[in-house]
Image: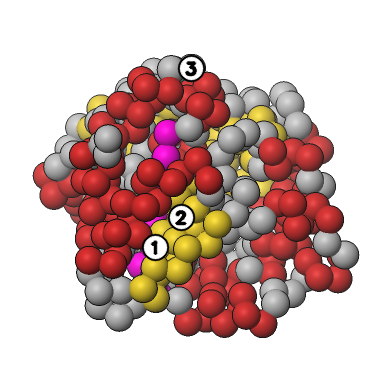
Amino acid sequence: MRDPRLEEYARLLVDRCTHIEPGWQVAVYTSPLSRPLAEEVIRAIARRGAYAISRMTFGGGRLLERAWIAEAPEELLDELPSIERYLHEHVDAVISIEAPENTREETAIPAERLTRARRAGKRLLDRLSGHEIPWVVCQYPTPALAQEAGMSTAAFEDFLLGACLQDWDALGETMRRYAERLDRAEEVRIVGEGTDVTVGLSGRSAIVSDGRRNMPDGEFFYAPVEDSAEGTITFSEFPADSNGRILRGIRLRFEGGVVVEAEAETEVEHLHGLLDTDEGARRLGELGIGCNPGITQYLMNTLFDEKMNGTIHLALGNSYTAAGGKNASAIHWDIVKDLRNGGRLYADGELVQEDGRWLI
């Protein structure tokens, strides 16, 4: 029996998140476990009079095929085949449904090979980050994701759909009110455990994510001024996931917008490798503020965790050109910090959030 919630979820992805138009060519990246949702999405695209180009991978629905990356000659990793380049240049929208069988699968692939493959596909990343075309990344509840969250699969399914199927217009109105205050600020200061860092926002405006991009949504975010970050931030509350590697106790110190010191309790070598990916990897590509009231606990799942009410996240690497960003990198790595227990957020010296609660 088809779950009516999946039909509603698919309509949300096709109608609101990507607003598919008749005649569009829509790439739907899926994997075998996502079939119930993927088929609902394909049906919804068809009803809009558009083409669904289904791209089945065994990488959990990600754009990269892990088995090929692991075995291909190195020279092939640096350039996409012409047919793939054509798709990246001409596709009208992208829907990516993540449904991993094993969230640690990428740990078996050398990080250098993953990085080279991502660089080859950067043109599509640029089109997405620049919002040249509509896109959405979402998830289908698999046992692996539920296990990471410490939930049964059924409980995680309810949690996922509850975080996604809500009144996005009302939440968007609330987030825009907060964003309007930060839009007027020259800089934002983040204070918390082991943390006192300022990030410049002069000339930059927020993008309010009210159910139109990632799903679940529920954040507003900035592309920070590239040379502005100063100070130290410690991500002591939650571990961070990078290609299936779990980094704990990350501490970063910025000078002139650049990470000049980086420490971690685990996976230090991997952290340094990420920072050395390219010149832009040591600069911030994003400051995001989580506002989704349906996400109340950490799940070891960045797509959810970065939207958690009362948190902020910084992303190292590629910035969103649609938000005024100019930083270019092959990586965009989000790291979440909890402000709900002693954290403070200032806009040009004015305290605007304390312990995760807004004061404006």
The residue to which callout 3 is attached is 150
Q: Position of residue 139 (x, y in %)?
A: 43, 42
Separation of marks 1 and 3 at Cα, in angstroms:
29 Å
Residue 214's label in the rendered image is none
The image quadrant of residue 41 is bottom left
* Cβ–Cβ under 8 Å for marks 1 and 2: yes
Separation of marks 1 and 2 at Cα, in angstroms:
8 Å
- In-image side of 244 versus 48 (left or right): right
What's the residue type where badge 3 is placed? Gly
SS at mark 1 in the image: strand
What's the residue type where badge 1 is placed? Trp
Instruction: Please indicate, yes or no, whether residue 355 appears anywhere in the rendered image.
Output: yes
Separation of marks 3 and 2 at Cα, in angstroms:
24 Å
The image quadrant of residue 154 is top left
- Toward the viewer: 157 or 330? 157
Residue at 70% across, 42% down: 106
Residue at 44% across, 17% down: 151
If you read the primary sequence from the N terminus, does the residue marked by circle 1 or circle 3 appear first?
A: 1
Residue at 35% across, 60% down: 42
The residue to which callout 1 is attached is 135
